[in-house]
Amino acid sequence: MTNENKDNPYQMALKQLDETAKIINLDKGIHKILAKPKRVLTVSLPVKMDDGSVEVFTGFRSQHNDARGPFKGGIRYHPQVTIEEVMALSMWMTWKCAIVGIPLGGGKGGIICDPKKMSNGELERLTRRYAYAISDIIGPYTDIPAPDVYTGGQEMAWIMDTYSTLKGNYDQPGVITGKPIPIGGSLGRNEATGRGLSFTVREASKRQNISMKDATVVVQGFGNAGQFAAQLVEEQGAKIIAVSDTQAAIINKNGFSANELIKYKKENNTIKGFPGSSEISNDELLTTECTILIPAALENQITSENASRIKTKIIAEAANGPTTPEADQILYNNGVLVIPDVLANSGGVTVSYFEWLQNLRREYWKEEEVNDRLDEIMTRAFKEVYDAHLKYNTNMRTASIALAVNRVAEAIQLKGIWP
Ligand code: NAD
């Protein structure tokens, strides 16, 4: 572990809040309120395993702040889930929803488990037990979970069914988002993160006087977010010159076709060996000269070790936390515009919000409508963060958190503290 990530995530989130508080001169009382989640529930989850034994898992749900609307945030299944991680992620969700200006607060859940070692039946029993255990604090108007690491549409379907059965036995799709389409999922949700990111890239290039037709793009991590981001920036005229996944990093200075790459990845389960490409190292990929760099894999990829060698104009963070604070400072000094994760990848939560709205109204939108509304929200959010970074004379990450904390603080102040 490097010095750059020695803090636990909650301490990192608190440090970020403290620094933002100074910049915006945050009221001390509000600062104290925001430093703690409103509620953190720990649940013990007994599950009958396939071999007849009983395992007891631990799960969490952290509800950070709901001053602007019901708590919202994913549920992750991972052996390394901790209460501090879930609390930090719930605070970041509060900021993310406030940045895009949707009327939701921040929440996050998790279960300490290794889903890759569990059968489908065991996962269903664990998921339903968790849904039962948190059923009194979630609901369509209180806390709306969603998928996160190693959870997806199937888990959301089980949670919705368990909750609906427990609470009066009628269908309540609005209790959760990220559902499969046949039970109330939204069109466009799958592409939403990559699409939202492509809108922020478009806006950033306008501010930097970059023509997308002349832009070259490097994507680290060719998964869900990376593939759609690549496809959609290519549609704007940019050329994808290097991509990577866990097995290889590849380059072709003449440009790849994003669609061909996606097809190849589907067939071969990797981009390694794509015709016409040469293999490079991960370090070479990140430091390839390009106009736009999209980290879409893991956290802590851009560090003080490589930041000064990065030769790009814009970094659009599809991944959560790919840049360390030290690297952020180096990039800012070098004039690289970083579109931070809380803004760049917020297309996902925005379309989750659309899914929830559709569920509450019992109506369904065409994909075109979802995409148009997403464009409107992302474009506005980008402008507000960009203007704030000029106003506070700081990087885009600090500016976005400052904007968010101001919005949440205003809501708390207006409502007052009662009882
Ligand atoms: P995914 O699993 O579909 O894709 C991740 C990709 O990264 C895979 O292709 C994998 O091969 C690659 N990868 C993993 N380790 C790598 C490494 N060391 N070097 C290069 N490539 C590597 O996941 P995803 O849903 O696309 O999520 C990617 C990131 O985006 C995560 O940080 C996630 O939290 C974030 N994110 C995703 C969404 C979403 O809606 N999918 C929303 C917000 C944030």
Image (spheres, rainbow, N blue to C red):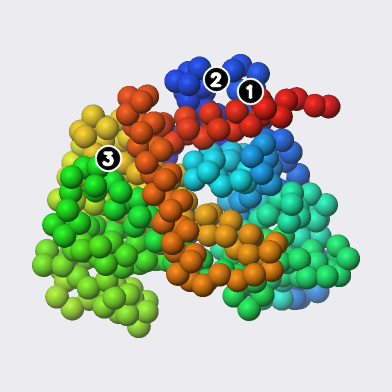
What amino acid is found at the position of numbered circle 1 in the picture? Answer: Ile
As helix, strand or loop, the secondary structure at mark 1 comes to helix
Sequence-wise, which precedes: disc 3 or disc 1? 1
**Disc on res. 337:** 3
Report if the beta carbon of the residue with label 1 is closer than 8 angstroms to ligand 1: no
Query: Which one is nearer the viewer's eye here, 232 or 14?
Result: 232
Percent position of residue 395, x then y? 34, 32
Whether residue 49 is visible, yes or no, is yes
Q: Which mark is residue 30?
A: 1
Mark 2 Cα-neighbour bin, 10 Å: few <14, some 14–19, many ≥20? some
Q: Quadrant of residue 155?
A: bottom right
The residue depicted at 74 percent of the width and 38 percent of the height is 39
- Measured in 3D between alpha carbons, the distance from the residue under mark 1 to the one under mark 2, in whole angstroms, is 7 Å
- The crowd level at tag 3 (other Cα within 10 Å; few <14, some 14-19, many 20+) is many
Q: Of label 2 and label 3, which has the lower sequence position?
A: 2
Which x, y percent locates residue 149?
Answer: 54, 59
Label 3 sits on a secondary structure element that is strand
In the rendered structure, the answer to whether residue 324 lies left or right of residue 337 reads right
Q: Are marks 2 and 3 in contact (CB under 8 Å)?
A: no
Which residue is drawn at the image coordinates 53% and 43% (left, top)? 101
Type of residue at label 3? Answer: Leu
Q: Nearer the viewer, residue 67 or 88?
A: 67
206 is higher (above) or lower (below) than 123: above
Apparent side of residue 102 relative to residue 331 in the rendered image (left or right): right
Tell me the number on the disc at residue 26: 2
Q: Which corner quadrant of the image does residue 181 belong to?
A: bottom right
Picture quarter with the N terminus: top left
